[in-house]
Image (cartoon, grey):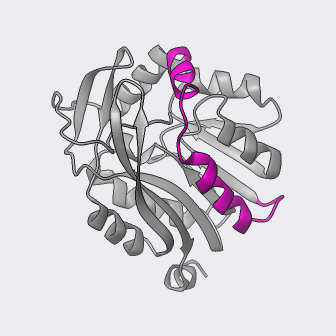
Amino acid sequence: MRRLRAGDCGRRGAPVADPKHVVRAGYEAIADRYAEWSASFETPVGAWLARFVERVPTGGRVLELGCGGDNPSTRELVSRYDYVGVDISSGQLERARRAFPGARFVLGDASAVELEATSFDGIVSLFMLGHVPRSEQGALLGRIAGWLRPGGWLLATLGTADAADMVEEDWLGAPMFFASFDEETNRRLLTGAGFELVEARVVPFEEPGHGLVRFMWVLARLGSARRDLAQ
């Protein structure tokens, strides 16, 4: 799973029964359509990924959460790093495995998947956290911090609409779950998980069919307090 819509304003939708099922089933249904749509416009991904690769040495171990299918950002990460991709959608991972046969992919929910502690030099999570219930986002950031080695780097996007858990009934042709906090809360959750925010700001851009969206882009390093806890 990749693109989320929790960054825009004024979202309305139905109450949520099982968010993980909604996300999984949604991306299974729209995997091909999503790939075509996401390739049809420019996002800030390239510029922010460049910031990440400047800091994480080539050959390091990198995890991508919500890796999706055959994305240009995944291609860049696979070409540079000892890469592991995690996604909740088997359909998306089928696309990824065809595109990157030498890479390792894990089918699972980022909030529940079991990964070795302090084993990654960098973690990338683009357009994924907005598919996670608000009650789980802080805990997931804590898990991400736990997977990073001392001094490890995080590149992430977070929604900024301060939108309660909801389902949009028709997102690219399928129901999809979204949730987000505001920018201030995002900062508090990140620092609470032990991250030092090196660069963090809201960057608006246009999505076809959806208009202007506003995501918080974050480049952060695991702070000394969290590193001390991991030792």
Foreground of the two, 115 or 158: 158
Which image quarter: residue 86? top right
In percent of width and height, residue 127 lies at 46, 43
Total marks drawn? 0
Residue 113 position (above or below residue 207): below
Q: Which residues are magenta?
A: 32-60
Is 83 part of what is drawn in magenta? no
Which image quarter: residue 209? top left
Residue pictured at 82% horizontal, 60% vertical:
58
| Quadrant in which the C terminus appears | bottom right
In percent of width and height, residue 145 lies at 52, 66
Give the prevailing secondary structure in the magenta stretch. Answer: helix
Query: Is 136 left or right of 113, judged from the image as shown?
Result: left
Foreground of the two, 8 or 93: 8
Foreground of the two, 216 or 98: 216
Residue 224 position (above or below residue 73): below
In percent of width and height, residue 104 lies at 74, 39
In percent of width and height, residue 64 lies at 61, 47
Is 41 part of what is drawn in magenta? yes
Residue pictured at 30% horizontal, 45% vertical:
133
Residue pictured at 56% horizontal, 58% vertical:
155
